[in-house]
Amino acid sequence: MTTASDPFRHLAVFFHDVDGLVATLAPMLTEALTRGDLVWAAIDDPARGAFERRLGSAADDVVFGEPAQPYSYSGQTTASRRADRLRELTADGRAALVLSDSSTVGGPGPRSSAPDFWSVVDASCNLALSGLPVTLVCLCDATGASEDTERYLYWNHPELFDGSHASPNPRYRTPDQVLASVPAPPAPPLGPPNHLATFEGVTALRGVRKATRRHGEEAGLSDEQVDGLVLAIGELVSNSIEHGPGRGTLAWWTRPGQVVAQIHDTGHMTTTTPGLRRPDVRSVRGRGVWLARQLSDVLHFWTGVDGTHVRLEISAA
């Protein structure tokens, strides 16, 4: 989220037609291109054509498309993937400007039809992209916006475009406040697992790691992926033991080329976004879940009346 010392900016713009959108944002894109910033535009074809006509030859330096592959059910994973990719893209010291029209980048439909999902994405981005030299501008077609869409866009964006200028948003809420009202959805059901085991106490970790390695090898993951899977599951189970009730279940769905694991305990987390914010290099805690996100394709937390769940997915490279 934006603070005085945080280069990350997250803005929303409501528009009624493509010409109005271009008139609002073209000056920002021109300034970014003049500075030599990276400019990405995940927008539909009509908007792309309008921006290309307005920018002229400068549009040749705009990359059209989403910087990172979104994920269908996990807004946390979508935000994490964005952060990882944008961290790579800005490693040379350049800043990045990203236009994001959710109807073009995956997920369960556009913001107007899935506002809860996109609220989780936006709130998670405020954590995952914190500290990066990135300006993320989210586009919302006001002609099709629902009441929920407008509310969640106001909640999740520290700045809003008012005419041609951005100004602070007094209705902005912190990610924790947003996710308390709009919790992360459960992962889709998978049916009965191939394997189900229980764990209790730190003495169970050795057996958990041994079984995890076996499942990864049986699925045909590479040696590097198996090592990453063992480390990720070990961190997640350890976190459940330390911060939860000390016991839980670990379910496995395995098939050639893919492993899905799900951890459940009866504890209730106060947040479903652990591991989204990159830990400080001097921090001695909070690194385990962030590392697990880097080692897996998908990592999704959610809570329910029965406790806390974590689903992890890894597919063969």
Image: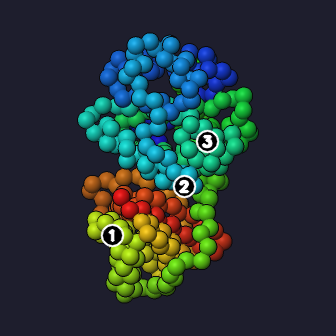
Is 147 on the left-hand or right-hand side of 88? right
Q: Is residue 103 visible?
A: yes
Could you tell me how far apart the alpha carbons at marks 2 and 1 are, in whole angstroms? Answer: 23 Å
Q: Please rate how many residues cluster around mark 1, counting C-alpha atoms within 10 Å: few if below 14, some from 14 to 19, many from 20.
A: many
Marks 1,3: beta carbons within 8 A: no
Residue 155's tag is 3
Disc 3 residue type (three-letter): Trp
Is 24 on the left-hand or right-hand side of 182? left
Residue 74's tag is 2
Residue on which disc 1 sits: 226
Q: Position of residue 264 (x, y in %)?
A: 54, 75
Asked if 29 appears above or below 302 in the picture, the reply is: above
In this orientation, which residue lies closer to the viewer: 171 or 313?
313
In this orientation, which residue lies closer to the viewer: 274 or 189?
189
Marks 3,2: beta carbons within 8 A: no
Query: Dot 1: what SS?
Result: helix
Q: Residue at x 38, y 76 (%)?
A: 218
Query: Dot 3: what SS?
Result: helix
Is 66 on the left-hand or right-hand side of 229? right
Q: Residue at x 37, y 22 (%)?
A: 61
Q: Residue at x 35, y 26 (%)?
A: 37
Of the image marks 1 and 3, the number of the one nearer the N terminus: 3
Q: Nearer the viewer, mark 1 or mark 3?
A: 1
Could you tell me how far apart the alpha carbons at marks 3 and 2 are, in whole angstroms? Answer: 19 Å
Q: Quadrant of residue 316?
A: bottom left
Q: Position of residue 28 (x, y in %)?
A: 46, 20
Asked if 60 appears above or below 6 in the picture, the reply is: above
Disc 2 residue type (three-letter): Ser
Disc 1 residue type (three-letter): Val
Marks 2,1: beta carbons within 8 A: no
